[in-house]
Amino acid sequence: LEIEVEGREHLDAALAHGKGAICLNGHFGNWEVMSAWVCRQGYHGAIVARRLKDPRLNAWMRQVRESCGIRVLDRGKNPIRIVRALQNGGVLGVMIDLDTRSGRGTFVDFFGRPAYTQVGPFDLARKTGAALVPSLCYREGLNRLRLVFGEPWWVENSENPEQDVA
């Protein structure tokens, strides 16, 4: 398997601020390979994942992820562990396109249409000072993947949290 990486300097620039980086990803491509690559490159990393309904499948997925060096943090459990994952320059992988039905979201423009978007990662970035790094892993052939890290950005931390997050 060949892996080509684009924008690693963006991830490094985000981490240079010392507050960690939240890699925002969507259910497109192979985020499992991307997470494993991040960990194998020596970055301190973790992902936030939803527990699967089948406990056997959940245990198997966790074992596969952890065998690649990925720390798995269960969504909705012990938020302190999520904050700690960012400390000391940690990288936190989060799926941004997941409808969490948590009531903690906002409608944003998505190609001219309103789309409900979870705000948890943005709240976390605002409160911790972590950079947000758009990221994606996609296939470019039978045995070739491209990992892309976009330019980092930071959520404002003003007196108006709703506006900052939006």
Image (spheres, grey):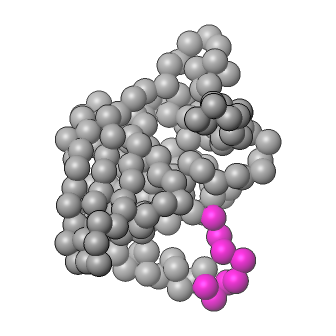
Instruction: State which quadrant residue 1 falls in.
Output: bottom left
In magenta, the rendered stretch is 50-57
**Is 23 or 46 nearer to us in this picture?**
23
Quadrant where the C terminus is found in the figure: top right
Q: Residue at x 50, y 19 (%)?
A: 156
**Image side of residue 17 versus residue 87, left or right:** left
Residue 134, can we see it? Answer: yes
Q: Position of residue 164 (x, y in %)?
A: 58, 20
Residue 53 magenta: yes
Residue 135 magenta: no
**Is 11 or 62 nearer to us in this picture?**
11
Report the magenta stretch's main SS. loop
**Image side of residue 77 versus residue 125, left or right:** right
Q: Residue at x 65, y 14 (%)?
A: 160
Q: Residue at x 33, y 40 (%)?
A: 150
Q: Residue at x 66, y 42 (%)?
A: 118
**Is 125 or 140 nearer to us in this picture?**
140
Q: Position of residue 63 (x, y in %)?
A: 47, 82
11 w.r.t. 136: above or below: above
Instruction: State which quadrant residue 65 falls in.
Output: bottom left
**Image side of residue 55 versus residue 122, left or right:** right
Q: Position of residue 58 (x, y in %)?
A: 60, 80
38 w.r.t. 135: above or below: below
Residue at the extreme bottom: 56
